[in-house]
Image (tube, rainbow, N blue to C red):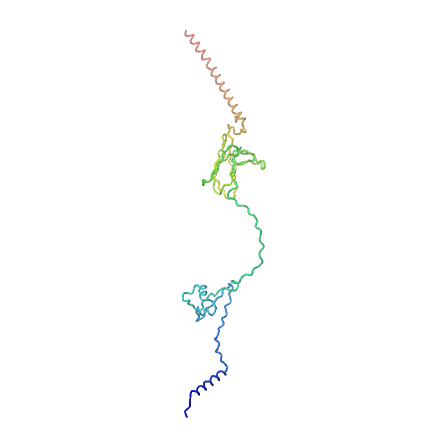
Amino acid sequence: MKLNLLPAFGILLLIVMVFGLALPAQASPAPQVVQYATPTPGPDGRILYIVQEGDTCISISLKTGVPIDVLRGQNPTLDENCTLITGQTLLLGLGGPAAATPTAGPSPTPTPILPTPTPFAGTTELCVMLFNDINGDALRQEGELGIAGGAVSVTNVNGNYSKTQNTVSEIDPDTLEPVRTCFLDLTEGEYNISMAIPDNYNPTMTLAYTLAVQAGDRASVDFGAQASATGGGASSQTGDEGGRSPLMGILGAIFLLGGGALGWYALRMRKPESKFSGRSLLKKK
């Protein structure tokens, strides 16, 4: 009897399928995961990695989570092929104290801003005085007052300032000091100062001076002059009004008397000679 194999094969396949569904399912083994502990940041906050044998830039990136481009940027010594050497130190990033965000503390109390004085743009003043140097020692003492009528010129050596003023002989009622001739708001630099004294005065010191001034300086310069003996600028302390000396008058009188005496003596000496000459002429006749 001839059997039909097709129905039998189908029944066998059905039995196998039912038996397979009845068996418990076997789960595929889970992939092995290697846990990597990130290195502890150092005191300076840097996180460093020591290259191990077999490491590559890709494996280090996968292991540490640091992208390769970041790894290259933080380690400029890596070449184009990212060649690594066992024991090499790589910088992974910053952490710890260096990367920590400081905690905001209390706001400081603002200190009130005090007004500051305006800085000087140049010298406040350059003051000059021409004083009556009575004793001629080129030093001004108390009682040696100013002389009016002098002309003082102040000129910057660069040529950007030049001014002339007259001297005075006034007394400041507040300080009881002689009033000086002042030049205001001079810029910083070097200046030539020259003095022209009035007639009937003689200088007792050099009448030209060069002075260098700094911003904020207050400078003063004194020049001395003395009244001439015959001048009208001031009376001489040893002569009468007009500068004449009594001694000169006495000497003149002595010379005048001496001249008169010599003339009288010469006249007396000539008279006997005339008589003698007359008598001699009479005898001859």
Q: Nearer the viewer, residue 53 or 199?
A: 53
Image mark count: 0
The residue furthest top is 285
Q: Position of residue 81 (x, y in %)?
A: 40, 67
User: Height in image: 65 above or below 188?
Assistant: below
Image coordinates for residue 222, horizontal then vertical, percent: 51, 37
Q: In the displayed structure, would residue 148 be above or below residue 49?
A: above
Residue 233 image offset from top left, x and y in percent: 52, 29
Q: Is residue 280 left or right of residue 143?
A: left
Task: Between residue 189 and residue 268, name the one nearer to us.
Answer: 189
Along the viewing direction, whichever of 119 and 42 lies nearer the viewer: 119
Q: Is residue 72 above or below residue 285?
A: below
Residue 157 in which image quadrant: top left
Query: In the orientation shown, which residue stands out farthest toward the bottom?
Result: 1
Q: Quadrant of the N terminus?
A: bottom left
On the image, the x and y values in percent for residue 15 come to: 47, 86
Q: Quadrant of the C terminus?
A: top left
The image quarter in which residue 72 lies: bottom left
Q: In front here: 29 or 243?
A: 29
